[in-house]
Image (tube, helix red, strand yellow):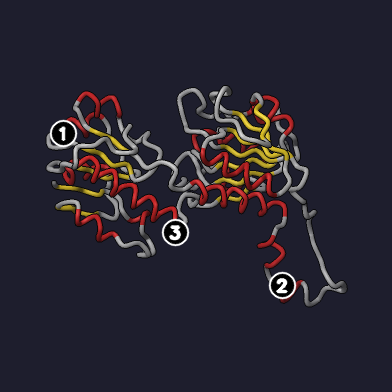
Amino acid sequence: MKIVFLDAYTLNPLNDLDLSILHTLGDITIYDRTPLDQIIERTKDADIVLTNKCPLNALTISKLPNLKYIGVVATGYNIIDIDATKSHGITVANVRGYSSASVAQLVFSLILGFTNRVAEHAHNIENTWTSSPDFCFYHSPLVELEGKNLGIVGLGDIGKKVANIGLGFGMKILATKRNTGTGGMEGVEICNQEKLFQESDFITLHCPLTADNQEFINQQSLALIKHSAILINTSRGGLINENDLATALNEGKIAGAGLDVLSAEPPTKDNPLLTAKNVIITPHIAWAGVNARKELLKGVVENIIAFQQGYPPKGMI
């Protein structure tokens, strides 16, 4: 089978993964990146296409007569026109659950960035601490997480990992979930979104981006949040109206935001959050822990092997 990997670079920018296993699956061509106007040319003869962020829309799919399988090198598959793949009899599979621990870890890295201010206190220590008249100094309140309310929007695999860490810190956990009848968790109070927004000291988003929740973090929902609260987003940038959040930050209506995702990635220089007050932005790295990327590669390979052997891939959509 002819296989094309359209955008392999972000999976292995440090060359710390062994991608040679992909060559055992067929005649594979691996591109670091693929411009939109070259997707069809590069995949026109492919039986299998692997993509992380390169979109495969209905028009593109219609021009790939040999295409039998699309492997999404991620969990989110909004870049694929699923209706078009179904009409053409193309199998699509993603990889689920590979990065739960990695994402949860970054959530608390961002939270602790606001509560302990490690980087800020460590900065230029030679000039600050050495000249201090006291044995210690701190220029902002150092906030303990114990006893604080952590609101988790979406109690799926990642949300539960975050909840476990929060419980370890002694936090009270509030959570919303789509199906309130199943999948609860000891120590977690399932509540409605309004209560979560009103009572949480930290709010972290762990839900897929859909037509129903696009920009649900907006002027109206931000008005419900405590002025002292911190918002964390490691899910999808489209969940947030970025102009509304920037305004809330600049006007002190919310204490801070830790964001690993933005509506456009890489962001444009005029994105209002880049210059907003009290915001920490990381470049979409929550998923990218070493072990997470190893698990992602393993899942991609296992899905292709299952498909080639006539079995439904584990991540079949």
User: Which secondary structure, mark 2?
Assistant: helix
Relative to 80, is 235 on the left or the right? right
Given residues 257 and 248, the one toward you in this image is 257
Q: Residues within 10 Å of mark 3 (few under 14, many from 20)?
A: some
The numbered dot on residue 306 is none
Q: Position of residue 71 (x, y in %)?
A: 28, 42
Please, what is the three-letter code of the amino acid marked with disc 2?
A: Ile
Relative to 31, is 79 on the left or the right? right
Relative to 311, is 297 on the left or the right? right
| Residue matched to label 1 | 63
Q: Position of residue 156 (x, y in %)?
A: 52, 35
The numbered dot on residue 290 is 3
Task: Kindly indicate the quadrant of the structure image that contains residue 53.
Answer: top left
| Residue matched to label 2 | 125
Q: Earlier in the sequence, mark 3 or mark 2?
A: 2
* In the depicted structure, whether residue 119 falls above or below residue 182: below
